[in-house]
Structures are given as structure tokens and as C-alpha cells.
Amino acid sequence: MADHAVVADDEVDLSRRKFLTRATIATGAVGAAFAAVPFIESWSPSERARAQGAPTEVDLTKLEPGQMVTPVWRRSPIYVVRRTPDMVARIAGHDAELKDPESKSSVQPPYATNALRSRTEEFLVLVGTCTHLGCLPKQRFAQGELYPTWPGGFFCPCHGSRFDLAGRVFDGSPASINLRVPPYSYPNPGTLLVGVDEKGIA
């Protein structure tokens, strides 16, 4: 009878030992996983770093002529427009209708202080928030879409601000300055890097 009790106790102890061993291993694995998370996350930019200006890369090879894509940089929408030759031609001829045709009072890098407000005539890069109260202007690229003499551009539905295909603001708009141009560069012909120019991260 005593031998039977010893065998039963040994079986209980062995089962308990296996359970405790498995529990210890599982706890250690979970702890290691939790410890690894911040270490792995440290390899990539934090949300704060991205919000403060980590660059945004755009693949221009997928953008068709006349189209616009809207990536995000510093928590702001960025309008990237691939202008057609016709769209470029429609930028000229209405300077007298603009508040700041030469962008003297507006915000842009030095290389975008020109009539096209861009490095190249093909690609327009703008911060896509209205300079009045921060609404999102809508693309209205078709000539005559808003009214017969409309050359194409952007229209803010919140308060009616209008901007041309270079982001320049029209007279009669609540917005006082042109749409902003962020710093940007082309590391290669098919890639746009928003937030970085030749001098580094802005």
C-alpha cells in the first residue's frame, strides 16, 4: 500500500515538474518577445520622426500624364501632378488675374520660384492644403470646368479659393498666398523624394 502511494506521488511530482517547466519556457518566450519589440521598432523611424519630416518616396513611373497622386509627408497631403504639355501651356496668359503671379509672397524653395513653381515643367509638387483655412482643394484640371475662361487647376470647396495649374491663387479667393511647395528632389528619373532636396532633409 505504501509502495503504491510512493508511485502515485512520483507521478504527481513528474507531472507537476513538466507543467512548471513548460510554463517557465512559455513565460520566458513571451518576455523575450516583449523585450524584442522596442529593439526591433528602434530600427525603423518612429511616428514622431516621420511626422517631423522623414522623407516620402513617390514612384513617378506609375503616374500617367494628366493624373495626380496624393502621398503624405509630415501628416500633410502632397499633390503630385504629372502635367501634360497642354496643361503647361495653360499656366501662361492669366497673370493679371492672380494675387501673387511671381510667387514673391508665397512659400516655396528657391528652385520653385518660377512661373511653373517646379523643378521641371512636367511634375508639379504642392502641399495639398488650402492656404486660407487648411481645407483640401479638389483637382479641376479640365479647361472651362468651373467657368468658361477657367484654365484648369484646383478649387477649394470650403470657401471657394481657386488656384491654377502651378498652384497660384486667383484674385477673389479667400486664400491670400499660393499653395505651398515642399522641398523635394529626384534621386533618379523615376523617383520623387518629398522632404529632401540637395541640401538634405528640410
Image (spheres, helix red, strand yellow):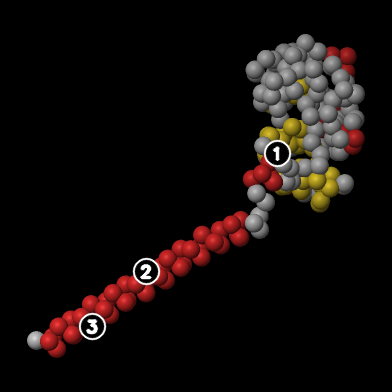
Q: Amino acid at mark 2?
A: Ala
Place residue 78 in its image quadrant.
top right
C-alpha gap between disc 2 and disc 3: 20 Å
Q: Is residue 152 visible?
A: no
**Mark 3: few, some, or many residues within 10 Å (few <14, many ≥20)?**
few
Q: Which residue is under mark 2?
A: 23
Labels 2, 1: front one: 2
* Nearest to N terminus: mark 2 or mark 3: 3
Quarter of the picture containing the C terminus is top right
Residue 61 left/right relative to 11: right
- In whole angstroms, how far apart are the C-alphas of marks 2 and 1? 45 Å
Q: Which mark is residue 74?
A: 1
Q: Is residue 7 visible?
A: yes
Q: Secondary structure at mark 1?
A: loop
Mark 2 surroundings within 10 Å by alpha-carbon count, few (fewer than 14), some (14 through 19), many (20 or more): few
Q: In the image, which is nearer the foreground, mark 2 or mark 3?
A: 3
Task: Measuring from the top left, give residue 160's x and y in whole percent.
Answer: 69, 15
- Of the numbered discs 2 and 1, the one sitting upstream in the chain is 2
